[in-house]
Structures are given as C-alpha cells and as structure tokens.
Amino acid sequence: MTAPAAHAKNYTLPLRSAVDRVPVADEDRTGYDRDLFHIWIDADRDGCDTRREVLLAEAVTAPEVTGRCRLTEGTGTWLSWYDDVEVTGQRRLDIDHLVPLAEAWDSGASAWNFDRRERYANDLGDSRALLAVTDRSNRQKSDQDVAEWLPIDDVVCHYVSDWTAIKLRWGLTADRAEHTALTSLAEGCPNTPVHVSTAD
C-alpha cells in the first residue's frame, strides 16, 4: 500500500505501518490542567452537549429524551466494549477520551491554542475519539497510555488500532515506551487497515 502524502487529509494504512507513522518524542506534563480543554460543549446549539451526543450515538437501545436533550435515567442500554459490560441507564457510564486529555497534553496538545484543545476534547468528527464506557473501566484506565493500561484481551487489537488512528488524526506523538508497546501489540494483531481522517 502506498504511503499517503504528508498533506493528505484522509488516508488508510495497514495497522503496523500506521503505528510506524506515529512520531516518537519525550512527554512532558508541565502545566497540564484539565480545564484547559473545556469539555462537553454544545457545539451545534441543539441542546445536547458532547456527553449526551455520544450517549445518543452509542446507545444500543435509545434512551427516552425529553425537553432539550434531557436523557431519562434508567432508560437506554449501552455496551462498554473496554470490559464487555452492558449498562442500563447512563448513571454508571463515563465518556472516555480514547487518548486521554493528559496524554494528549503530553504528546503535543500543550502547544495548541485553546480552540484546538476544545475541539479535541469534544471531537464528534471521529467516532473512535469519545466512548461511552463503564465508570469503573474509565477510572481504571485514568490517563494511562497503551504501555500502562489495556482493555480486555478480546478487544486489544481494536483498541490499538483506534489509539493509533486518534494519535495520527491529531498529530500527536508517542513516547518510547508507548511506541514500543504499540509496535509489539500490533505485531500480534491482524494487519488490518487503519482509516485516518486528520483534524483541521
């Protein structure tokens, strides 16, 4: 498969080639503050903030919605694929940034302006970026990268592929331990295509 031009907005690479394309750089958390990313905005002003947009998009069974995007507790079901748990009602769900905000900061977002960080934190342009998962799995993961935390074995290859896609989408780097882990994990996975749509 031909490597994409450096300026290509959308491209596809086999998993191992995609992992190789993630730049390696040291990480630095100096100055990190979660508030610098401004999560859960209502970008299209339809009454649904980012959290609720993700919940509605990922529901296996749609929840009841009243008023301006009020999700009725106890309705709707979701499958948290990190741990293969089906959840009824949103109370036990967190919206996870696949590549955590702190990890993004370490990997290049510290140099971004506020607008770009806000867009990253509320990225509805790629369905892999934000995920409805159990609060337990999200808190176990916290801000760890693939060298430090992985979901259940059955979905590790899915996770590695999506992690790589989001890193490439936003032009983020990986530190050496993370890149080594990605490379090793990808070697044990099918060399399936990774579709990348770069963020503006």
Image: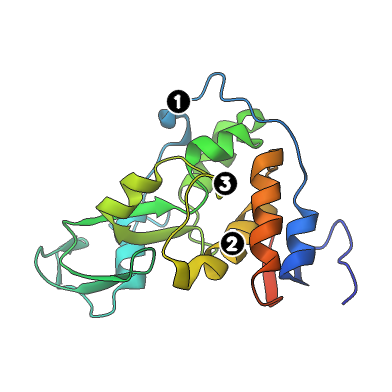
**Residue in the image at 63% along x and 61% along y:** 185
Residue carrying label 2: 160
Say which residue label 3 marks: 147
**Residue nearest the observer in this picture, 58 or 27:** 27
Q: Is residue 138 visible?
A: yes
Specify which label sits upstream in the sequence, 1 or 3: 1
Quick check: 158 above or below 184? Answer: below
Percent across and percent down for residue 40 are: 36, 47
Mark 1: secondary structure: loop
Cα distance in 3D space between marks 1 and 2:
26 Å
Element under disc 2 = helix
Residue ID at (39%, 42%): 142
Q: Residue at x 34, y 65 (%)?
A: 83
Q: Could you tell me the amino acid type at mark 2?
A: Val
Residue 17 placement (x, y as % from top left): 80, 65
Q: Kindly indicate whether the residue at mark 3 contacts the one at mark 1 (C-beta within 8 angstroms).
A: no
Callout 3 crowding tier (Cα within 10 Å): few <14, some 14–19, many ≥20? some
Dot 1 alpha-carbon crowd within 10 angstroms: few under 14, some 14 to 19, many 20 or more? few
Q: Earlier in the sequence, mark 1 or mark 2?
A: 1
Q: Which mark is residue 33?
A: 1
